[in-house]
Image: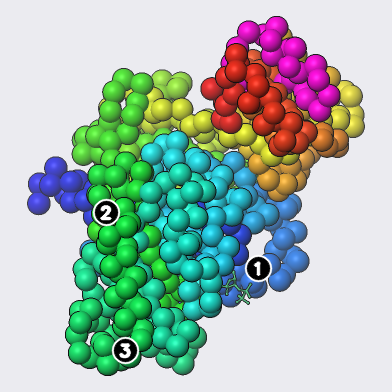
Amino acid sequence: MSKAATLSDAIARRRTFAIISHPDAGKTTLTEKLLLYGGAIHLAGSVKARRAERHATSDWMKLEQERGISVTSSVMQFEYSGFQINLLDTPGHEDFSEDTYRTLVAADSAVMLLDNRKGVEERTRQLFEVCKRRRTPIFTFVNKCDRVGEDPLKLVSDVEADLGIACHPITWPIHRDGAFVGVYDRRLKEIHLFDRGRDHGARRAAVTVGALDAREVTDLLGEKAHEQLMHDILLLDEAGHPFDLDAILGGELSPVFFGSALTNFGVEPFLREFLELAPPPLPRETTTGMINPADEDFTAFVFKIQANMDPRHRDRVAFLRVCSGKFEAGMEVMHVRTKKSMRLAAPQQFLARERTAIEEAWPGDVIGVHDRGTLRIGDAVSSGAPVEFQNIPRFAPEHFARVVLLDPMKRKQLDAGLRQLTEEGAAQVFFTSATETVSPTPIVGAVGQLQFDVMLHRLEHEYGVRTRLERITGRYPRWVVGKIEEIERVARERGRLLLYDVKGNPLLLFEDQWGMRWVLDRETGLQFFDVAP
Ligand code: G4P
């Protein structure tokens, strides 16, 4: 195969996506089942068992804290049916941080995982908004269908109303005597009936596949369940949004799937349809036009930096998403921001949380490279012309605190530390005045509590600065664009605080959501944004 053909083949086969969900919807379980179907693991339970094992040992937590790193998150690469899949891990639970949002910038599509009893929850909504803003195609998987949940029709209409996205169910759950026994694939017009087996979902589920009116299937289902299914399908066909691939790819229509990650029911039909419909790596916007993945020049951008994997060194691992061309180990590239040449040494790829050295990578892939502090979030590297990708936005923090210096002589070190952490994307720093960027007590913002813990730890161990955090009651920030006198007027009311980010952009911090909405509705002369402009 010619070089160009190899590149276009590698692109066509790749699917790079992330799962967005609220804690406990079943992300770990689904991830594990996808790895199981992809042959990356042979017995489900191992990823989870390892996670439980790690959480159980307090030693591990201590180590993790001492190193000042968040719970290792990575990229899982596996193959299924000729596709090369990159599943980007989005840290959740207590390790939820800005990284979780930024990972979505590196994905080409997202799978929104919902609990069939709870539908759309808070975290899902926040992550959905990031995808929506970027017009990322979103596939919905309604999980836990092995238990009685919300009526599927109601669930779908709730998702539409809550998130403002149209839905098109591709698979539909089939129940017999109250039990979840299979799904109907409306695109393939196929019924999949599952056999639960006795291993509690450790292996792939056995399936019987047939047409809606196949004798074997109707016999298996029984008359009542079959009638109910026919009725549902008719209703969906007549009253639902029609299938429209362009709308799916434009992020306006979400294909919906029903299943149970625990028992594997519906996982394989979902995976097959998802791979078929989800986009391969697409052209990416740069400040000088679009970069096509099939361009010969290798380009990539940094979307995440993980500090101090090795406690003896200050080195970090920068995660780069490949946007175009082929990457080869040891490649000389231009670091666009500094215009300096750098060698991408010891690149790594990640398979189910194990790291392996790699020789090559293609558009859509993620590589981890060791870095001594040169790379920053959003930086681009290129083997050809210099490119700058669209900015990775700074996402609104949810927690704010004043940094109190315990040793006043360490002012300089604190500033240096905060500057470095900001550049890495590990912290956001704010000031109470637009001109004074070295204020006596800077304010830091974090998306999750763990981000604060890591910040304090790193300031102490890498910069020798002992600090204490004083929490601020404000939790809801909005960047504001408008006349500064107007912004100052709004900020004078109780329960509001005017801050400036490192670039001098003003933002208002509100103590409660109600107060924020009130201002947003009334102050029509100002523009409010939940990411930095
Ligand atoms: P998360 O990563 O999104 O937080 O969720 P996780 O997979 O850890 O799943 C959360 C809980 O939901 C787990 O139960 C898991 O077994 C259960 N679960 C996941 N998928 C399904 C499903 O399809 N059906 C049902 N009925 N349950 C599901 P747990 O009791 O918290 O943990 P465990 O003891 O089962 O590990």
Q: Position of residue 211 (x, y in %)?
A: 20, 79
Give above or below for 507 relative to 55.
above
Which residue type carries mark 2? Answer: Pro
| Label 3 secondary element | helix
Residue named by callout 3: 223
Q: Residue at x 61, y 50 (%)?
A: 122
| Label 1 secondary element | helix
**Residue 54 has which mark?**
1
| Label 2 secondary element | loop
Give above or below for 50 relative to 526.
below
Residue named by callout 2: 242
Mark 3 or mark 2, which is nearer the start of the sequence?
3
- Left or right, residue 521 beside residue 365: right
Q: Residues within 10 Å of mark 2 (few under 14, many from 20)?
A: some
Q: Residue at x 27, y 54 (%)?
A: 242
Q: Position of residue 60 (x, y in %)?
A: 70, 63
Name the front one of labels 2 and 3. Answer: 3
Q: Residues within 10 Å of mark 1 (few under 14, many from 20)?
A: few
Q: Which residues are magenta?
A: 479-499
Residue 359 visible in rendering = no
Q: How far apart are labels 1 and 2 at the CA level?
A: 46 Å
- Left or right, residue 60 beside residue 423: right
Which residue type carries mark 1? Answer: Arg
Write down which quadrant ligand 1 falls in. bottom right
In front of the other: 159 or 67: 159
Mark 2 or mark 1, which is nearer the start of the sequence?
1
